[in-house]
Image (tube, rainbow, N blue to C red):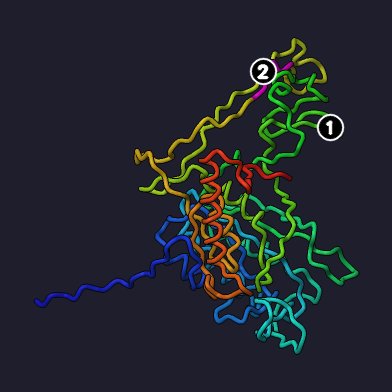
Amino acid sequence: MGRRKARRRKKRPAYPAGRVHQAGAVEGLLALPAGSVQCIVTSPPYWGLRDYGVEGQWGMEKTPQEYVGHMREFGRAAAHALRDDGTLWLNMGDCYASGEVGRHDGRTPGHTYGATHPGPRQHAHLETGLKPKDLVLMPARVALALQADGWWLRQDIIWSKPNPMPESTRDRPTTSHEHVFLLTKSARYFYDADAVREITGHEATWEQWRKADGRNAPSGTLSEGINCGFGSKKDSFTHPAGRNLRSVWTIPTQPYPGAHFATFPGKLVEPCVKAGTSEHGACPSCGAPWARVVERTSMKIDRSERAGAVGRTQTSGTMTEPPTARTIGWRPTCKCAREDTVPCLVCDPFAGSGTSGEAAVLLGRAFVGFDLAGGDKDLGGHTANGRIARGVNKRKRLALETRRGEAPKTLLRRRRRI
């Protein structure tokens, strides 16, 4: 018998970290090793909003159903690349049914990438199946489709914009928010809540927190739990480490000096990366993130003798010792017995101008991105890969200044101020 020719496996292209590669979102994600990404932070092109003039682009589908179908393909590719304990943060905006693309880009020289420009409007007909002026609810359609495909939808975060895009409408409120969906592959996943506590300016001191009890807090009543506050509505205090991250993020949009219209701010990416990846790093062998070791103590309550009295629905008493939560170190979440770590990998399959990549490397994470136009496309004197390289250099300068004992010129805040 003759020898059978061995089948040649199709070699997947190598996409090293630290760059935005020229590839579609699905193609790029499927080319990554399975379960290699800890966190995906991305903002796909919104349906019916603008034409980027790139072959294979998303957002110009004729119907909402076709767009949702593409996003389901993206979800399956993301599930391949994402670790089982990873998180997907999906930023999406909505639009209104009008039968045509809301903004256009005729690709005339000198105009911004994906922006509106004056001149003849070449409308693309869109079959919405909705009445004119109907809100399409595209973020909800995509979220429900991904949920039906097996994703856990853990939170619908509202990105509130204090400086929204002006609108000429007079028969409805101006749209000033977008959605950030937190999606996971399983019910249990990595999430570092202590990395994204919110500083309100009303944090109690540890001495105040220690002296407070259930009836005699510094300014009113102490609520149970380290995520709650105590005090009157006018002057309330929260846990010394800050309160738990809320689901409404007020972050202004940022101007981008390059020629790219649809960019989201780095401040929107930061809490996603901080919560979704380990600050300490991951195991070099299996990629499991190291977890924060938090020393927690429960509050101690001196139960009242009046417990169970008429009119009381729960046991009452006075808190003698408050709850505490302090970071004392880090621990591995795997059994590889490795003491060294590598940065957690963050991915943006719709990298665009490289905002997410710059934010990730500034926080000390590894990054890989994909975009149909590539990371070296000239965006008015700027490129996505150029931004990422500047972020890496900036991070190195900060580390050097810290080792020398100098005050960093640019502080990387560990907790977001609201």
Q: Is residue 188 visible?
A: no
Can you name the residue that lies furthest to the left here? 1
Q: Give the overall secondary structure of the magenta segment.
A: strand
- What amino acid is labelled 2 in the image? Glu
Numbered mark located on residue 397 in the image: none
Can you name the residue that lies furthest to the top here? 305
Residue 12: percent from left, percent from top: 37, 69
Q: Quick check: 288 left or right of 44?
A: left
- Disc 1 and disc 2: Cα gap in Å? 22 Å
Q: Is residue 185 above or below residue 77?
A: above
Residue 13: percent from left, percent from top: 38, 70
At numbered mark 1, what does the secondary structure look like: helix, strand or loop?
Answer: loop
Q: Which residue shows up at 46% across the image and 49% down it?
A: 343
Residue tagged 2 = 321
Q: Which residue shows up at 58% across the image and 41% down it?
A: 406
Residue 56: percent from left, percent from top: 55, 79
The quadrant of the rendering that contains the N terminus is bottom left
- What amino acid is labelled 1 in the image? Asp
Label 1 close to label 2 by CB (< 8 Å)? no
Residue 327: percent from left, percent from top: 56, 32
Residue tagged 1 = 235
Q: Which residue shows up at 74% across the image and 87% down it?
A: 121
Can you name the residue that lies furthest to the bottom here? 120
Q: Is residue 30 visible?
A: yes
Q: Which residue is more in the foreground, 160 or 16?
A: 16
Tell me where the magenta segment starts and ends, as one range: 318-323
Q: Which residue is more in the foreground, 27 or 409?
A: 409
Q: Quick check: 169 left or right of 197?
A: right
| Callout 2 crowding tier (Cα within 10 Å): few <14, some 14–19, many ≥20 | some
